[in-house]
Amino acid sequence: MRAQPQASHFVAGAWAEDRAGAAFESVHSATGEVIARLHEATPAILDRALDAARAAQPAWAALAPVERGRILRRAADLMRARNRELSVLETLDTGKPLQETLVADAASGADALEYFAGYAPTVTGQTIPLGGDMAYTLREPLGVCAGIGAWNYPIQIAAWKAAPALAFGNAVVFKPSEVTPLSALALAEILAEAGLPAGLFNVVQGGGAVGSALVGDARVNKVSLTGSVPTGRKVYAQAAEGIKAATMELGGKSPLIIFDDADLENAVGAAMLGNFYSSGQICSNGTRVFVQRGLRDAFLGRLAERAATITLGAPLDEATQMGPLVSAAQAERVLGYITQGRAEGARLVCGGARVGETGAFVAPTVFADVTDEMVIAREEIFGPVMAVLDFDTEEEVIARANATEYGLSAGVFTRDLARAHRVVARLEAGTCWINAYNLTPVEMPFGGVKASGVGRENGHAALEHYTRIKSVYLGLGDVDAPY
């Protein structure tokens, strides 16, 4: 299998390479096979990308928003037309099963481009009557936006950042994760084919040092990161040094609360989606599953039955429901947490081991009898490991659910909708679901509170994070001066 791009970077509307940059590889985690070799961005590549973005942005911002929207809509159409090839590329790079990438990755990116293409022409300012005089406001783009992606949803994250930034008149320099570097390049090529002027969406490769150079550069006006909390703290602090706008979409240890009266099959299905989809590598996953004591035994029994039917296997086989973790290193990290859960006294219900002779496969794993102080209930594992905790009362579970530094997501399952709304109102989380989990349509703002992030992706809320307001006072009379 090969997925070698034409070059490592996409800068100023064209492929770019500089072999002076450190070499690195993209590995298909199901087999350990190297599928592409690339080079990190050198200072020369970064300069070219930032200069191109800076030069192209003013003319782009001056276009009528509907003209910008037409280009993004064409790109969305191209992504949908090429969904299968983009999905295969994403499967090779991430290890996620093709059954999943066909519906959840490039398709979601296309939705974002289409949504913001339509949103851009609706953006207006305000007029403010002041008696004889008046004031008005303008929405202006920020300038050059630096995007830094994570490895779990590479093309979706690139599109979620590019779509609002470009729709509202900004330019973008995007750095994908060095673990999954390929699909952002495919997005850049599609945008160029759709008619996006050169320099407005650039892709540069590399690790933390390249990201830091990007964030710290004076040509960058806005920083948007999707990543872990430790990385977010560093990037947010660096952005603050330059007084730059920043959005941080970070990790979580989210609670999924299941009351006794919940529909059992739906609750089990949501818990599985919130822990095993993408092999558990989703920041919003509900990895602390609180089950009210009256439903616990039935929940665990049905969960074990359904987990046993999950098909692990070759990611390119569309019958496969769960693939490997993104890398061998991530698999070892997850297995370490499983060992720790056993040592702390959690009861293993199913899974708990590596699967197969090759590849980074870990079985879907469920721990019961988990207590709040256990490491597996406190730290983000980012793998297919579910911790099931018991609770008795509504008041108790709310307090325990909020007892974490994280605040990305939360879910509630109950037939009592009054209780559902009451509980959600008290949960310290930025994105919540009632009788559903992990559905993130582009129309809905997504993001966290507390250590899980700042700002929002998607929805109308994105306007606040990719534009600034200019206020204009219009004097219509004589100046009243006391001297």
Image (cartoon, rainbow, N blue to C red):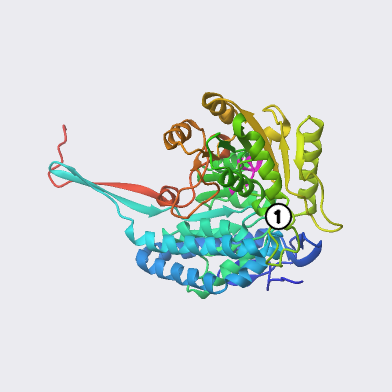
Q: Nearer the viewer, residue 352 or 429?
A: 352
Q: Give the quadrant of the N terminus.
A: bottom right
Q: Is residue 180 left or right of residue 329?
A: left
Indicate yes or no whether the magenta region holds residue 231.
yes
Q: Give the quadrant of the C terminus.
A: top left
Residue bearing the label numbered 1: 310
Residue 380, can we see it? no
Q: Nearer the viewer, residue 110 or 58?
A: 110
State which quadrant residue 473 falls in.
top left
Decide: is 46 above or below 192.
above
Q: Is residue 81 left or right of residue 99?
A: left
Q: Secondary structure at mark 1?
A: loop
Residue 369, can we see it? yes
Give the percent coordinates (x, y) of residue 435. 50, 44
State which quadrant residue 322 falls in.
bottom right
Decide: is 90 above or below 483.
below
Total labels: the figure holds: 1
Indicate yes or no whether the magenta region holds residue 17.
no
Decide: is 287 above or below 69.
above
Give the percent coordinates (x, y) of residue 305. 70, 47
- Farthest-out residue, right: 357
The amino acid sitting under disc 1 is Ile
- Residue at position x 50%, y 38% in the image: 414
Give the percent coordinates (x, y) of residue 5. 68, 71
Give the percent coordinates (x, y) of residue 391. 61, 28
- Residue at position x 41%, y 64% in the image: 117
Which segment did they paint magenta? 226-232
Judge the density around disc 1: few (<14), some (14-19), many (≥20) Cα neighbours within 10 Å. Answer: some
- Residue at position x 72%, y 58% in the image: 311
